[in-house]
Image (spheres, rainbow, N blue to C red):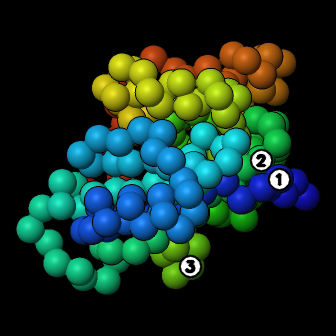
């Protein structure tokens, strides 16, 4: 069985956006890699981001602190290769466990799943080096679409099995920005 090679990041939903960013700067000595009014990404090491913050005051204006809003949105785990990610996809699919959101973020190729309690997790493979990821997160392309583009995991699996090279499998597909699924808690 293929297992993740590392814990990657955690994403928090907050109504204390600036306060949270400042706290993580102070406590972890983290630095902001990308920030806009809705989303911020921070790191404290060689990973492109270890923390992300979704500003609910922008994404869900007028809400309160209802359960499911404020708190952990998802945790992410990194796999060593596209092959390992697709092996996991096939294994889980055989058990009737399907991702609710396959998306290529530009920096990662990702599959999002929910556990029986509804906790969300991201299984990902890095699409570039951390330095390339950080550069992309500071680019106009990322500013225009920080969410990414949905992809078909069955198509990706078929391309992998047909012998497509890793670079082509990790290239972000063309397409419109993916809507954030309702199951992700930010719609």
| Residue beneath the point at 34% across and 28% down | 143
Q: Nearer the viewer, residue 92 or 137?
A: 137
Label 2: how many Cα within 10 Å (few below 14, some 14–19, many 20+):
many
From where the camera sits, is residue 31 visible?
yes
- Give SS at disc 3: loop
Residue 79, labelled with which disc? 2
Residue 1 percent coordinates (x, y): 90, 58
Q: Could you tell which of marks 1 and 3 lies nearer the N-terminus?
A: 1
Q: Nearer the viewer, residue 176 or 20?
A: 20
Q: Could you tell which of marks 2 and 1 lies nearer the N-terminus?
A: 1
Name the residue tied to disc 3.
116
Residue 177 percent coordinates (x, y): 35, 30
Please say if 55 is above or below 65. above
- Give SS at disc 2: loop
For the C terminus, which image quadrant? bottom left
Calculate the distance from the C-alpha at mark 1 to the C-alpha at mark 3: 23 Å
Q: Are marks 3 and 2 in contact (CB under 8 Å)?
A: no
Q: Are marks 2 and 1 in contact (CB under 8 Å)?
A: yes
Residue 36 percent coordinates (x, y): 29, 41
14 displayed left or right of 113: left
From where the camera sits, is residue 99 visible?
no
Point out the residue furthest to the left here.
Answer: 62
Name the residue tied to disc 1.
5
Please say if 7 is above or below 49. below
Point out the residue furthest to the right here.
Answer: 1
């Amino acid at each position: 069985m293929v297992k993740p090679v590392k814990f990657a990041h955690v994403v928090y939903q907050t109504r204390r956006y600036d306060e949270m960013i400042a706290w993580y700067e102070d406590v972890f000595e983290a630095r902001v890699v990308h920030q806009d009014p809705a989303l911020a990404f921070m790191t404290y090491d060689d990973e492109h981001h270890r923390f992300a913050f979704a500003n609910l005051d922008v994404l869900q204006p007028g809400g309160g602190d209802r359960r499911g809003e404020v708190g952990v949105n998802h945790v992410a785990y990194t796999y060593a290769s596209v092959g390992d990610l697709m092996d996991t996809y096939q294994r889980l699919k055989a058990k009737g466990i399907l991702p609710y959101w396959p998306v290529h973020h530009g920096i990662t190729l990702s599959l999002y799943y929910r556990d029986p309690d509804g906790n969300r997790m991201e299984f990902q493979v890095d699409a570039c080096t951390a330095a390339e990821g950080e550069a992309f997160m500071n680019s106009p392309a990322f500013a225009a679409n920080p969410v990414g583009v949905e992809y078909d995991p069955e198509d990706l699996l078929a391309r992998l099995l047909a012998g497509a090279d890793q670079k082509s499998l990790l290239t972000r597909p063309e397409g419109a920005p993916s809507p954030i699924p309702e199951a992700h808690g930010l719609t």
